[in-house]
Image: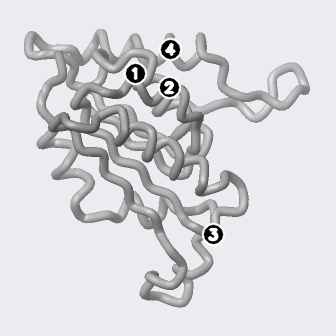
Amino acid sequence: MPQCPQTIQGKRCEWRSHMLLEALDELVTLHSTLDGPAVAVIGHSMGGLGAYMYAAKFPGRVRAMVAVCGGGHPMFAARLASPLPLWFFHAANDNCVAVEETDAVVEAIRAARAGTSGAVRYTRYAVSNLTCATEAFVGHNSWDLAYREPELVPWLLAAPPHP
């Protein structure tokens, strides 16, 4: 779980691809097996975007990908036309990253996978579907619900190696 520093030399920091790739490549190398990668890329917010971007750039290096409220650009969806297991989470009332970004990414990946066996999971938290009053205020904090999802860990463990 690499963390992006808040500032570097007094300036606001955001992930740079080389920072993320170095950390992930080290993990993938350490945890690869003869069957393929044993690493799942998971992130939320900027980390969710990073997980999506890493999986799109190197789909053969990971076993599965989970992106929580990360958004992204649909132009990279064609790179995920393979059956790599993907699961996206986002709250409809996110006030930081527009849910429509994730909607567009998921729609584009599903279109790229049309006619294949590669399903894309998407849990979109609609305020009207939430069961608890406090859950109605999910906003950008959708990782609380996503990481409590009872199917998430079994789904990750069931993901086949992706050569």
Query: Which quadrant of the view contains residue 28?
Result: top left
Q: Which residue is mark 3?
A: 93
Structural crowding at the residue carrying mark 3, measured as other residues with C-alpha within 10 Å and reported as few (<14), some (14–19) or many (≥20) = some
Separation of marks 1 and 3 at Cα, in angstroms? 29 Å
Q: How many marks?
A: 4
Q: Amino acid at mark 2?
A: Phe
Separation of marks 4 and 3 at Cα, in angstroms? 31 Å
Structural crowding at the residue carrying mark 2, measured as other residues with C-alpha within 10 Å and reported as few (<14), some (14–19) or many (≥20) = some
Residue displayed at 47% across by 88% down = 132
Q: Quadrant of the C terminus?
A: top left
Residue 27 position (above or below residue 157): above
If you read the primary sequence from the N terminus, does the residue marked by circle 4 or circle 2 appear first? 4
Image marks 1 and 2: residues in contact by CB distance under 8 Å: yes
If you read the primary sequence from the N terminus, does the residue marked by circle 4 or circle 3 appear first? 4
The numbered mark at residue 21 is 4
What SS does tag 4 mark? helix
Describe residue 73's horizontal placement relative to residue 6 as left or right: left
Residue displayed at 45% across by 30% down = 77
Separation of marks 1 and 2 at Cα, in angstroms? 6 Å
Instruction: Give how far across and how far down residue 157 sits, in percent.
Output: 16, 42
The numbered mark at residue 95 is none
The numbered mark at residue 79 is 1
Q: Amino acid at mark 3?
A: Asn
What SS does tag 3 mark? loop
Residue displayed at 76% across by 35% down = 6
